[in-house]
Amino acid sequence: MKQAVALYPWARSNYLTSKDGRLHIDGVDVNELIERYGSPLYVFSERQLRENAESILKHFRRVHRNTTVCFASKANANIAVLQVFKDAGLNIEINSGGEFHKAMVAGYPATDMVFNGVAKLDSELRKVIAAGIKAINVDSLSELQRILEIARELAQRANITLRIIPEIKGGAAAGWETGTSESKFGMTRSEQLQAIALINQHPRYLKMTGVHAHIGTQVTDISAYQREAAFLIAYFKEVTELLPYPLEHINLGGGFPKNYSSSEDNWSTVAEHYKSNYRTEIDFGILSRTLIAPISRALGESVEIIVEPGRSMVSDTGILLSRVEAQKERNQHTMYYLDAGYSVLFDAFIGWYFHMINASRADDTDTNLCKVVGPLCDSSDVFYDIEGEGYVKTLLRDQPELLEHKALLEKVLVHQPSMRELPTATQVGDVLALFDVGAYGLEMMNDYCGRLSAAAVMVDIQQDSRLIRRRAQEEDLLRYDVY
Ligand SMILES: *Cc1c(COP(=O)(O)O)cnc(C)c1O
């Protein structure tokens, strides 16, 4: 097993290209962006955002015209991003009062929003019910009871969709599954029967508008969607029998996967379990046939099908640029220190793989294996899997009898290849680019170790760039302290 995902090919036509050895994003030289806006810097492609929105709407509506795509805003709630999606025809999924606020600022009406969450606050429920939200995806009986009280107090009727547990595994890795009763999400069948009885007792305040499930994130197993579709079709029919009026919609959640490198060839020499998390054949066309079409056939064309994609709408729309600040030689390998660590890209902390190239030497073919780390004073702040490697080594040293299970241990404990391939000439001052950081990047950024949150820019269709999130300043570090 080779220790690194292959660096080449990385280019994506019309999006990520090189000119004079430097990375260009939608035709814009990243060096110019760094000079103008500083480092580290998130760069979003408006063209790529629009392309994703158009692609999902086109594919899903071709098989079912009455399809609504609610972008899961926790994946990226930057106002400029939300506005591009609104303009492209998407609706929105929120999971807090804060996201409700951001969605309103971005211009979405409450009637275009669905609201998820396992512990919604009274204050949040009051706001969304008063605004006439399209659907509250209810996660528990206790929540439904609170909604009833608030709706009564407001003398309004709340639109209720129940989140069912379909008992489907499918998240790309353990811990990312949200569709089983081992997770914290959703209601069991018997809880739902009680909920429906309560809804039927209070038609003035509660209206059941739909059923909902969401099975995980980066779900790369196509059979999970087929099982989800079959489950929800049967469940939809069962609920229909229990209600005095028809259900309006069926909400399939999100979790659709995206590729985390430009080519399958990059992964040919690493262990299969890395590849299966980060490479997939599944696109919106395949999903339209395996998930949307069977539901449309079974339930008819008048029902509204709602989906809540987050990651798949934005992951490939964002690049993180980060400068090399230091380097050392360690165990025959160079270790490069970036100005961005997991405080800027939190998913690195859980060992998520992001493809990385040297944006200053994009065409160099003389390469070496190396290690790349962030600036934080924490040994977990690495862009390769130091912790996982360490666990396996320690376990095997302490319990040599586990040696025969080495492959299994690596599969469970090591989430990333242990090395990076970069040009041999890489040096302090170069700019590295991490790809596919558009989902869960900006949203999970924090100020750990007193490091200032990064700025973000959007490259637009005219190849102009504009700031869509300012860089934090030192005063921002004090904004919550009272003294
Ligand atoms: C997070 C979430 C989504 C979006 O998940 P992705 O994997 O980003 O597509 C959709 N629905 C619910 C209920 C969620 O919690």
Image: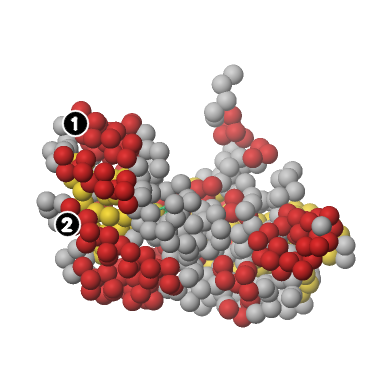
Three-letter code, disc 2: Glu
Report whether residue 418 is seen: yes
Q: In which image quadrant can residue 397 be found?
A: bottom right
Q: Is residue 31 left or right of residue 97?
A: right
The residue that mark 2 highlights is 241
Q: Is residue 279 left or right of residue 198?
A: right
Residue 333: give x, y in percent of width and height.
84, 65
Closest to the observer, 453 or 194: 194
Q: In this view, does 177 lie to the left or right of 448?
A: left
Residue at 64% of width from left, 57% of height from top?
A: 351
Question: Which quarter of the rendered picture does the N terminus lie within?
Answer: bottom right
Residue at 52% of width from left, 45% of height from top?
A: 470
The residue that mark 1 highlights is 152
Rendered view: 112 above or below 275 = above
Residue 365: give x, y in percent of width and height.
73, 79
Q: How many numbered marks, from 0 up? A: 2
Closest to the observer, 180 or 317: 180
Residue 225: give x, y in percent of width and height.
39, 68
Rendered view: 349 above or below 354 = above
Residue at 42% of width from left, 58% of height from top?
A: 167
